[in-house]
Structure formats: C-alpha cells, structure tokens
Amino acid sequence: MFDELLDLIKVEDLNRTNDVSSAATDNMWSIYIDEEKFKLIKVEDLIFLLSDISKVLKNVWGCSFTLYFWFDAMAGQLRFSSLNGVVDNLPFRSKIEITDNIQFFSEKIYEYVKDMHMSREYPSLQWPLIVYRVK
C-alpha cells in the first residue's frame, strides 16, 4: 500500500548537514491517508509502515541518525523527517509529546485519521502534537 513512498526514500539524496532547520525540511516526507485507504488499514499496518521506513532510512543514512514522525492535523498528513546524528532539539515551535512507543504512536495516528474522516467539523486544534522518535 505504501511501496511507492518506500521506493522514493531509498533513492532520496539526504541533507546531511548539522543545520537542523534546513535538514528537517529537506528530509521531510508526508503521507495523506484518504478515506478509501483508511478503510483498508489497521493500527498494525501503521506499525509496519513506521518500521519499514526506519529500516530503509537506516540503510540510506549508513550512520547514526534521528528519525521522527508526527501527524500534521491541519494538513491531515502523517509526516516524518530524519536528521544527521542524534538530535534532542526537534524543530517544532509548539509543545510536543515525544514517545518511543511505536504501538502508542500508531494508535494515536489511527485515531486522528479516523476522527478526521468521521467528523464534519475539522477538530485539528484538539489534537496534541505527538512525535514518535527513533534514535
């Protein structure tokens, strides 16, 4: 279901600088899960996707890196980016909740996407920014 994205990441030319702001933007990808696709996925699919992305990027980087995922409620997208080395100060201006629990994060993303497709109103302001970080 997400094979095209994984293929794109495999050939991506990463920004390997230590400038967190530019690297975070240059190394960012996003996935929009439309209503049709959402009907076909489960939480386990998101866990497999995040794990696959982690594995692919580990091979692309070939060294230590920081990978993080978040749900952009305003855009309705699951986004992720990777940075050179181990980075503790992620480039977010708002307050974030960081987790390393892939199950917890995937369940939250699933809930957010479900809410997005089930609600007539767009309740994006109610969703906290939760970041899943892989070091």
Image (spheres, rainbow, N blue to C red):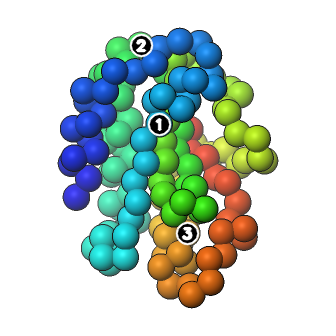
What is the C-alpha distance between the residues marked 1 and 3? 20 Å
The image's mark for residue 80 is none
Q: Amino acid at mark 1?
A: Met
Vertical comparison of 99 with 88: above or below: below
Q: Amino acid at mark 3?
A: Tyr
Say which residue appears at 48% left-offset and 42% top-offset.
80
**Residue closest to the eye, 58 or 121:** 121
Q: Earlier in the sequence, mark 1 or mark 2?
A: 1
Relative image position of residue 83 (x, y in whole percent): 52, 24
Say which residue appears at 54% left-offset and 16% top-offset.
85
Label 3 near label 2: C-beta < 8 Å?
Answer: no
The image's mark for residue 28 is 1
Q: Please indicate, yes or no, whether residue 49 appears anywhere in the rendered image.
A: yes
Q: Earlier in the sequence, mark 1 or mark 3?
A: 1
The image's mark for residue 112 is 3
Relative image position of residue 75 (x, y in whole percent): 54, 60
User: Which quarter of the image is occupied by the N terminus?
Assistant: bottom left
Say which residue appears at 34% left-offset and 50% top-offset.
49
- Mark 2 lies on a secondary structure that is loop
Q: Earlier in the sequence, mark 2 or mark 3?
A: 2
- Quadrant position of residue 74: bottom right
The image's mark for residue 63 is 2
What is the C-alpha distance between the residues marked 2 and 3? 33 Å
What is the C-alpha distance between the residues marked 1 and 2? 18 Å
Q: Amino acid at mark 2?
A: Cys
- Mark 1 lies on a secondary structure that is strand
**Residue closest to the eye, 64 or 126:** 126
Judged by depth in the image, the label closer to the viewer, 1 or 2, is 1
